[in-house]
Each structure stands twice: as C-alpha cells, then as structure tokens.
Amino acid sequence: ETNGFRLLDVDNRIVLPMNTQIRILVTAADVIHSWTVPALGVKVDGTPGRLNQTNFLMNRPGLFFGQCSEICGANHS
C-alpha cells in the first residue's frame, strides 16, 4: 500500500485522554534509542541502565505518529 505513511504503523496503539498531563518512562536494553512524536514536540532517549522520562500535555485530538529518531540499527532513523 502506498498511502504516504511508510512504516508508520505499530502492533499496539495507545489512546491518550484529552487535557491530561502525560508522563512517558523510557529505557533500553542494548543501545541508545530515541523516540519522538514530532507533531507534539515530544522526544526522549532510551539509554541502557538509565530510566528517562518526558512529560507533555495532551490538549488536542488527532492521530499522531511516533518514530525512531536515533541510528540504533538496521532500518532505523
């Protein structure tokens, strides 16, 4: 399918409540990873041996795509 969204799908989607402060906790088991949702201005690194967090306010409805933003292996970033 060529609908313009190359590889932008996941196995498990998440629904976030509106007008709520969201906290995301991230870590990694192998190498540094980085996850971003550009439309929301959210980006956080996952680092082995460390627990990182980011917070944001979910204040608008929509369908938002997260993506890898770190060269961490084949087919990433």
Image: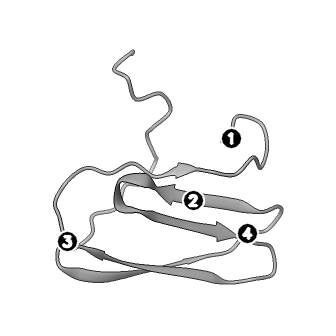
Q: Amino acid at mark 2?
A: Trp
How many tags in the picture?
4
Of labels 4 and 3, the one closer to you:
3
* Label 1 crowd (10 A; few <14 / some 14-19 / many >=20): few
How packed mark 4 is, by other alpha carbons closer than 10 Å (few <14, some 14-19, many 20 or more), is some
**Mark 3: secondary structure:** loop
Tell me the distance, in whole angstroms, between the alpha carbons under discs 1 and 4.
Answer: 15 Å
Instruction: Kindly identify the residue that appears in the image at 39 percent across and 48 percent down.
Output: 65
- Of all residues shown, which one is farthest toward the top? 2
Label 1: state its secondary structure.
Answer: loop
What number is the disc on residue 76?
1
User: In the rendered image of this protein, does residue 45 appear above or below residue 50?
Assistant: above
Helix, strand or loop at mark 2: strand
Q: Residue 19: name its quadrant.
A: bottom left
- When the figure is inspected, residue 18 is found, relative to residue 21, above or below; the finding is above
N-terminal label among 4 and 2: 4
User: Looking at the picture, which amino acid does disc 1 mark?
Assistant: His
User: Would you call the spot at circle 2 few (<14 residues within 10 Å), some (14-19), or many (20 or more)?
Assistant: some
Between disc 4 and disc 3, whose residue precedes? 4
Q: Are marks 4 and 2 in contact (CB under 8 Å)?
A: no
Residue wearing tag 3 = 59
> Which residue is identified by label 4?
28
Residue 34, percent from left and from top: 64, 60
